[in-house]
Image (tube, rainbow, N blue to C red):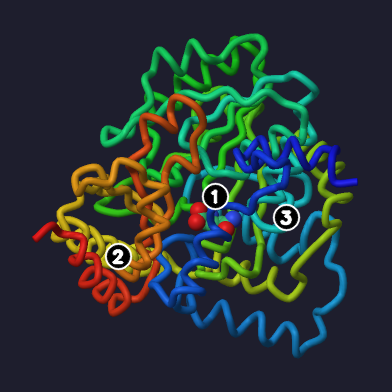
Amino acid sequence: MMRSGPWRRAAAGAGLLTADGVPGTTIFAEMSALAAATGAINLGQGFPDTDGPIEVLRVAQEAIGAGLNQYPPGRGSAVLREAIGRHQQRWYGLEVDPDTEVLVTAGATEALAAVLLAFVDDGDEVLTLEPAYDAYGAIIALAGGVHRTVPVDWPDLRPDADRLRDAITDRTRVILLNTPHNPTGAVLDETLMRVVVEAAERHDALIVTDEVYEHLLFDGARHVPVATLPGAWDRTISISSGGKTFSTTGWKIGWLTGPAELVSAALAVKQFLTFVNGAPFQPAIAAGLDLPDPVFARIAAELQAGRDILIAGLEAAGLPVSTPAAGYFAIADGAALGFPDGADLCRQLPSLAGVVAVPVSAFCRGDQAARMRSLIRFAFCKSPSVLHEASERLAALRPR
Ligand code: GLN
């Protein structure tokens, strides 16, 4: 019974089909289980260890008390869709119609699934950067698509413009961008995005952009949504989520925005995936999106402070590390300490240092996995005391 079926494509698409044909679990689940089993500090899976803004949490509590516990409308509750509209206008100057150009989803993950299943036919190519978030490969494969990639190398973290341009052809149905980027923490620069928009126009491809880390920007970095670039709006679906910005990853409230026709096609699929989700959390994320600018600045500043603690700890341990411009994660190179295989190092890290990380190769395949073999990713979306403790523990890696 287990032998065949599209599950094989999903597992293989994420590089998780084991030799005996059993579906593996994601690297995040595997490493979180390892942390739980060993008591190591979990800097693997990206989730915060403290709550986000109380104003957001309170609205959800009140909504449950007020009886907002049944199915919300199919496109999402009006209060959230309107708040998403105001958010796009306030931060990016984008005018989106909350009734036709916004769709609320079960996290960014469902938005990705709905869009790719809506637009990718058997054999269509989907282009992403590599490394890429693990769900991309799995969903592309479920949709029957062919996953093409353009490498992002470490530590410069910038895809080559010519390679990006050349990878977009008449076979490309979707260019799936992710900025700020997981796992590198890089913000895609505008010149590269323009290359993508021009090539997408030339080859009539759609652009899908995953912007879940849009507000977690450091050192004055700026997030420019692809949808704001000339020529982009008509062929672009932008995806985001409340999980990262408001430290509510377990709520799974995400959304997509774009031209009405594309949003309707995504809805046609989404309504048969989850139909709807998270009624009491939707007004809470709406309240979050309406919070004043300084709250967003504080969220980013706190995360930047966490980044700096972790980076100092990794450097003190003798690990070369890149400084991310955004997001939850920093990448370090285990080769310098005599660990050429990051996956191996991650399995040993709980006993060596009482810390859990994830190998960057889990976000890659083939050649790129080989090139990134010694790299490991650490999450810094944790309290300062936890990051200080992790840093002290990581010092055990330093050769004596
Ligand atoms: N996005 C989170 C990460 O990269 C994990 C989400 C998950 O476990 N699927 O760590």
Residue at image location 58% in from the left, 25% down from the top:
127
Q: From the viewer's perspective, is residue 24 above or below residue 202?
A: below
Residue at image location 66% in from the left, 57% down from the top:
107
Q: Whole-Å distance between the Cαs marked 3 and 1?
A: 20 Å
Please name which of the two marks, 2 or 3, marks the residue nearer to the observer.
Answer: 2
Q: Which circle's residue, 2 or 3, is located before the other in the chain?
A: 3
Q: Percent x, y for residue 370?
A: 40, 30
Q: Percent x, y for residue 48?
A: 46, 70
Find disc 2 in the rendering and name its residue. Answer: 352
Residue at image location 38% in from the left, 72% down from the top:
41
Front-most of residues 349 and 282: 349
Q: Which circle's residue, 3 or 1, is located before the other in the chain?
A: 1
Q: Are marks 1 and 2 in contact (CB under 8 Å)?
A: no
Mark 3: amino acid: Thr
- For numbered disc 1, what is the local secondary structure? helix
In the image: residue 395, left or right of residue 236: left
Q: Percent x, y for residue 177?
A: 53, 34
Q: Residues within 10 Å of mark 1 (few under 14, many from 20)?
A: few
Q: Whole-Å distance between the Cαs marked 2 and 3?
A: 40 Å
Mark 1: amino acid: Gln
Find disc 3 in the rendering and name its residue. Answer: 105
Mark 2: amino acid: Leu
